[in-house]
Amino acid sequence: MIFVAGSANLDFVVRAAHIPAPGETVLGRDFKTYPGGKGANQAVAAARAGAVPTHMLLALGDDAYAVPLEESLLAAGVQRHIVRVPDQATGTAFICVSDDAENAITVAPGANLSLRASDLPALDGFSHLLLQLETPVPAIAAYARSARDQGLKVVLNAAPAQALAADLLALIDVLIVNQGELAVVAQHQGSVAKCLERIAVPCVVVTLGAHGCCARNDGHVTVQPSFPVRSVDSTGAGDTFCGVLVAALSQRSDLLQALRQASAAGALACTRAGAQSSIPTHAELTDFLAAQPDATPAQIEALKTRCGFAG
C-alpha cells in the first residue's frame, strides 16, 4: 500500500492560442474546472493507473471547492484522511493551456498550508510514502522522518522547485524531479549527469519531457525513451508519472520496468485535458504498453548522450 501526503487544488483551466507573456492579455476559449493538486493527482494515479491500494492525507477548506476534490479521490478508490480547515479556502490553481499543449500554472495554496506534523496517522502496512512540495516543508520533513522510523521507503517529488536542506534529502530514498527542478536541487546548471553528482540521494529519477526519463540508482544509470503520442494537455502528466512509478515500485517492479510504466502513463495523460481527468485506468495503461516496442540500443544511447552519461 502507498500513503500520499500532500496538496489538493481545484484547477481553473483556460485554453488559449498561447500562454501570455508578462503584461500581455490573451483571449482564451474553453474554460473548465478539474480536480488537481500534485498530491491528489499522484494519489489518483497510484490508485487508478497503478492499481495499488492508496491512502492520502490532505487539507481542505469547508467550501464548495472541496466537494469535487473529495469526489474525485473517492471515485479513484483513494482512502482519504482529511484535515478540515474552516477558516481557509480550499487550494486552487489557475492554469493556461496553449494550443501546443504547454501550460503555465499559478497556485493559491489555501488550506494546503495548514498541514502539520501531527496530522500524519500511523503508517502500519504501507510500503512507500509519497510527498511533494506544495505543503509546508517542516511538515514534509516530519512525515519523511516518521516514515523512515516506521520502515517505509520515502519518495519526494521536489515540485514546485526549491532548494532543499541536506537533512531533508538525507531522509529521501527516491527523489523525482524534472530538469528544471534538478538544477534547483543540485544548485548547478550543468548536464543531468553533472547535476546528479551533487545530490546525495540513493535513487534520483529525472523526467525529460518529450525525450523520456532517466534514473541514477546507487550509481547505476537507467534510461527510458518517451512514448510518442498526440499531446493535448500536459497538465498532470508529471504527477501521473510519479504516482505510477511509486505504485510499480511498491509492487516490487525493477526500476526499468517502473520507469517504463510511469512513462507510458504520463504519455497517455498528455492525450486528454485536465489533471486527474487525464489519468488512464490500469487496463488502458496495460493495453498501451502491450502495443509499444522496447527501446532500441540506438535510442538508449542517444538519451544517455543527451543526459551527459555517454563517453
Image (cartoon, grey):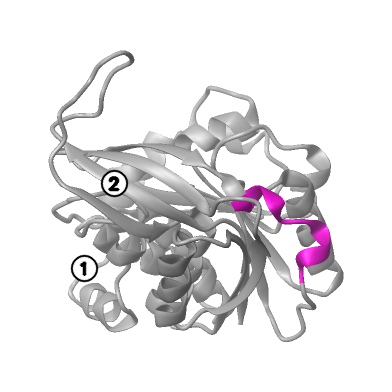
* Quarter of the rendering containing residue 49: bottom left
Sequence-first disc among 1 and 2: 2
- In the image, is 231 to the left or to the right of 174? left
The label number, if any, that marks residue 13 in the structure image: 2
Observer-nearest of 110 and 259: 110
Residue in front for this viewpoint, 252 or 270? 270
Residue 162 magenta: no
**Can you give x and y, in whole percent of width and height, for residue 93 in the image?**
43, 45
Please tell me which residue is depicted at 87% across the width and 69% down the height of the picture.
149
Magenta segment boundaries in residue numbering: 111-120
Dot 1 corresponds to which residue? 293
**For the residue marked with disc 2, what is the amino acid?**
Val
Q: Is residue 120 left or right of residue 242?
A: right
Q: Which residue does the image show at 71% across and 46% down from the upper left?
A: 136
Q: Residue furthest right?
A: 149
Is 241 placed above or below 123 here?
above
